Amino acid sequence: MYKKSFILFLFLLLYGCTQLLEEENAGKNIFVGDDGCVYCHTNKERLKLLAPEEDTGGGGGGGG
Amino acid sequence: MPPMAPWEKVYIKLPRSGNLADLDHHFEELSCVDCHGGDKTQNNNKEKAHKGLIQDPSEFTTVDGKVSNSCAGEECHTSTAEEYHNSLHQQLWGERKYVALRSGVSSFDQCPQSTRDGFNGECTSCHATCGDCHISIPNSAGKGLVNDHRFQKTPNMEKNCTACHGSRVAFDFYGEEGLEERQGDVHFKTLYMDCFDCHNQSEMHTRVTDTDNTDRYTYDLRPSCFDCHPADSIATINLYHTMHMDNMTCYVCHSQKYNNCSACHVKGEWKTDPDYQENNPHEDFKIGLNPLPAHRDFSDVKYAVVRHIPIAPDTYENWGSASANLPDYNTIPTWKFASPHSIQRWTPRTDASPCYNNCHTKEGFGKPENKEIFLFRAEIQEKWPDEVQANDPVVVDGNLPDGWE
C-alpha cells in the first residue's frame, strides 16, 4: 500500500515539476527545435503570455 | 457556447505520443506552414513567425483569375472544393437573389456597382469556409479551434452550425429553460436528433446551378417534413390534420414562438435605430397568407407563419446614392415565409379545448383576442409604416372566414 502510494506521489511530483518548468520558461526564448509553430501552439503557458485578451475575434454571429 | 480565452482558441493539445500525426492524419504529411504560410524557423518571435500568415486557409482566393483553396490539391479535396465554390453557403445566392429583386433587376450582376461592392464588403462575411464547418468556430462568432485542430468529418452542431445560425435556429431548436413557449424542438429535445439527421453533406456541399433563382426555400436539396412523415400516413391521423393539412403549413400548428430578425444587416445600424428597435419584436408568432405559394411542400397552401426581417427602403443608403433607392422594395414582403425549428406536438395554438379555442377568432367559435396571432395591415401601418405596401400579399385582411375580423 505505502509503496504504491509513494510511487504515485513520485509521479505527481515529476508531473508538477514539468509544469513548473513549462511555466518558468513560457516567456523565454529557449526553443531550438525545427518547428516553431508547433512549439508555441502546443504550449499552454506560452500561449497565455502571447495571446493577449484584446486579440479576440468579432462579435456574436449572424448567418440566417 | 461558453466563451473561450484567446489562448484557448489557438491551443492544440498534443496527443500523449507527442506526435501531431496521431491527432489527425492531415499532420502526417503537412506542417502548419504548408497551409497557413508564415515562418516556422522563427521559433521565438511571434511577429516574425506570423509574417505572411494565412488565417483561413480554406477561404477561396483568386490570383490572376485562378480560384484556389488550400483544401484542394493533388490527391486532396479538389472535387469537393470545386463543387462547394458555387454553393449556397459559399456564395449566398439567396441573399444575392433578394438584393437583386428589391433593386429591380433579375440578377445580382445587374445591381448597381455600389450595391455589389457594398454587399461583397459587408454581407459576405457570413459565408462559410470549409473550416467554419469542419475545423474552427466561424470568424463572425469569435473564432477558435473546435477540437484541437482535428479536421472533423461531422461538423459540431453548436460550435459550427448554430454559431452562425444563432439568432434564429439556435433559439428555436434548443429552447430556453423556464420559458413556457420555448420548449425547444421535439426532434432535438425528445428525439435527440441533430442538424445532420435532416441536413446532409450533399445539401451543404453541392453547387447551385440556377444561381439567380435559388434561395433557402427553392434549393432542391433541402429536407422536407414529408421525408419522414409521409403525407398519406399523417393526412387523416387526427382531426386537426383532416381539417387543415391542405390549408396551412405544419408550422402554423406545430411551431412555438420564434425569433424575428433584428440587428446584423448592414453594419448593424438597426441595432441603434431607436424607432426600429422599439417596434422590433424579438419573439413572436404570426400567421399570414403564404408568401411562397410555389413552395415545393406547401403549394397552394393558404396560411403560413411569417417572420419579420430587417430591411427598410433605405437600408443600403450608406453604400452610395445608386444603392439608396430600392425601386422594387414595395413588391417583396418583409414578412417572410418561416419554418421555425421549434416543433412540438402540442403548442399554445393546438393545446386547447375545444380544439379551436386558441386559434379561431369568431366570438363563440373561438376568441376575438386570438387576432393577436394573425398579421393584419393595421399593425404594420402602426409599427412599420414604410412596409405596408410590400406586405399587401401577406396580410390576412379580407381573407379570413366570415365573422373572424
Image (cartoon, grey):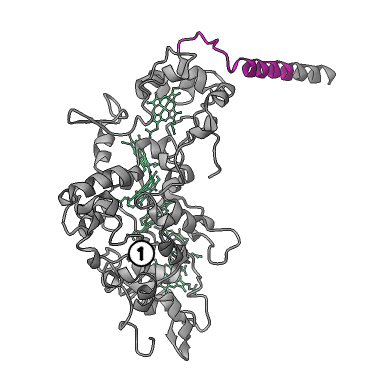
- Tell me if residue B375 can be seen: no
The spot of residue B323 in percent (x, y) is 22, 53
Write down the residue under mark 1: B230
Dot 1, crowdedness within 10 Å: few (<14), some or many (≥20)? few
Q: Is residue A27 visible?
A: yes
Give x and y (percent) for residue B65.
17, 31
Q: Which residue occupies the foreground of this view, B43 or B129?
A: B43
Drawn side of residue B87 relative to residue B360, left or right: left
Type of amino acid at the residue the image marks with label 1:
Pro
Q: Magenta-highlighted stretch: main secondary structure?
A: helix
Name the residue rendered at 52%, 32% in the picture.
Answer: B6
In the figure, B109 relative to B57: above or below?
below
Magenta stretch encompasses residue A26: yes
Residue span colored magenta: A11-34
Q: Residue furthest top?
A: A32
What count of labels does the image hold? Answer: 1
Which residue ends up furthest to the front in the rendered image?
Answer: B321
- Identify the chain of the residue marked 1, using the numbered disc in the image: B
Residue occupying the point 53% across, 11% down: A31
Residue A14 is covered by the magenta coloring: yes
- Front one among A36 and B252: A36
Tell me: residue A22, above or below residue B366. above
Residue at 33%, 64% in the rendered image: B336
In this picture, is A26 found above or below B11? above
B48 to the left or right of B389? right
